[in-house]
């Protein structure tokens, strides 16, 4: 770092105690012997803008942003990247030396890098992708899939109007399926992604029939508690290549860490184990 202040970063949300980001960034700070700190902060929506304007004065160089602030920070930021604007949310803030707040979204990057690392032979152009869920995570995933060269995205959500809204935004490459027909969209899909909370600890199980899955498909689940969801275990049993969701958390964190602390961290097994410990 060029100045003598100890750089501070952190993650804001409400609630925030569940976040694994402090473990990950703390591990990287220690691994690369960086004099810095990463702090979890529970911030109410009413205090969001005042907090964002005050933190740089206290030595903060940036933040990760999680629920429920990912959309609202776009309106507060002075500069917004094209991908954050397209997704409609930011997960990474950089506090610039000129006082401006720069908002970015690295979720799509983290998603694609996780697939590349977990399924090295993954080929986006091999066929359509089937995406389950139409929330904020789905927006980032769809944008990343299309940018990577996926020819079409099949989309199903329990509330169909939300999926149709994404089709309006992303265009004719999106094909919306009724929720009761979600199993049908898996037939011939080269990439299958669960972006919903189904299968997460404490949430309902995913009941979509998987018998239409191709053995050649790459199947990934953004849920990482548990690491192996029912979707992944069933897909693995059918012979598919599977990628768990933890890697997306690790990869989406790396660009922010580099911007804040000046070192590009390695996403490897040691980083995974640091988060899981």
Image: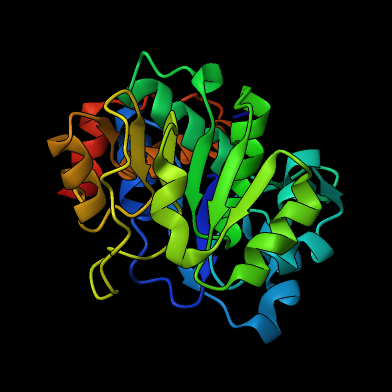
| Protein image colouring | rainbow
Asked whether, in this view, residue 228 is left or right of residue 87, the answer is left
Asked whether, in this view, residue 7 is left or right of residue 120, the answer is right
- Residue 108 is drawn in which quadrant? top right
Q: Where is residue 138 in the image (x, y as percent from the top left)?
A: 56, 53
Q: Where is residue 179 in the image (x, y as percent from the top left)?
A: 48, 65
Along the line of sight, the residue nearer the viewer: 123 or 43: 123
Q: Position of residue 266 (x, y in %)?
A: 38, 23
Looking at the image, how many numbered discs can be counted on the residues? Answer: 0
Asked whether, in this view, residue 79 is left or right of residue 108, the answer is right
Residue 52 in view, yes or no: yes
- Residue 119 is drawn in which quadrant? top left
Above or below: residue 56 compared with residue 32: below
- Name the quadrant of the N terminus: top right
The residue at 38%/65% (across/down) is 197
Above or below: residue 35 compared with residue 241: below
Along the line of sight, the residue nearer the viewer: 224 or 190: 190
Asked whether, in this view, residue 93 is left or right of residue 171, the answer is left
The residue at 81%/57% (across/down) is 77
Above or below: residue 78 compared with residue 214: below
Q: Which residue lies furthest to the top in this view?
A: 121
Residue 63 in view, yes or no: no
Along the line of sight, the residue nearer the viewer: 9 or 86: 86
- Residue 269 is drawn in which quadrant? top left
The residue at 35%/30% (across/down) is 218
Q: Position of residue 189 (x, y in %)?
A: 45, 34
Along the line of sight, the residue nearer the viewer: 184 or 23: 184
């Amino acid at each position: 770092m060029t100045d003598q202040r100890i750089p501070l970063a952190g993650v804001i949300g409400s609630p925030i105690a569940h976040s694994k980001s402090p473990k990950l960034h703390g591990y990287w700070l220690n691994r690369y012997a960086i004099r810095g700190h990463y702090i979890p902060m529970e911030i109410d929506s009413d205090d969001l803008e005042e907090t964002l304007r005050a933190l740089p004065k206290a030595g903060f160089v940036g933040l990760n942003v999680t629920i429920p602030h990912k959309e609202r920070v776009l309106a507060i930021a002075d500069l917004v990247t094209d991908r954050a604007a397209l997704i409609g949310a930011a997960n990474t803030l950089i506090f610039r030396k000129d006082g401006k707040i720069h908002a970015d979204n690295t979720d799509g990057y983290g998603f694609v890098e996780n697939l590349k690392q977990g399924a090295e032979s993954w080929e986006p152009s091999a066929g359509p992708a089937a995406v389950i869920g139409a929330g904020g995570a789905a927006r980032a995933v769809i944008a990343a899939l299309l940018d990577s060269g996926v020819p079409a995205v099949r989309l199903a959500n329990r509330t169909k109007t939300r999926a149709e809204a994404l089709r309006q935004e992303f265009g004719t490459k999106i094909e919306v399926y009724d929720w009761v027909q979600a199993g049908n969209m898996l037939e011939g899909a080269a990439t299958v992604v669960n972006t919903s909370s189904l299968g997460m600890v404490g949430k309902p199980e995913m009941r979509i029939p998987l018998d239409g899955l191709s053995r050649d498909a790459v199947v990934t689940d953004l849920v990482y508690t548990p690491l192996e969801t029912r979707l992944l275990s069933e897909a693995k049993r059918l012979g598919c290549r599977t990628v768990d969701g933890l890697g997306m958390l690790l990869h989406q964190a790396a660009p922010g860490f580099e911007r804040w602390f000046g070192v590009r961290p390695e996403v490897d097994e040691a980083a995974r184990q640091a988060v899981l410990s």
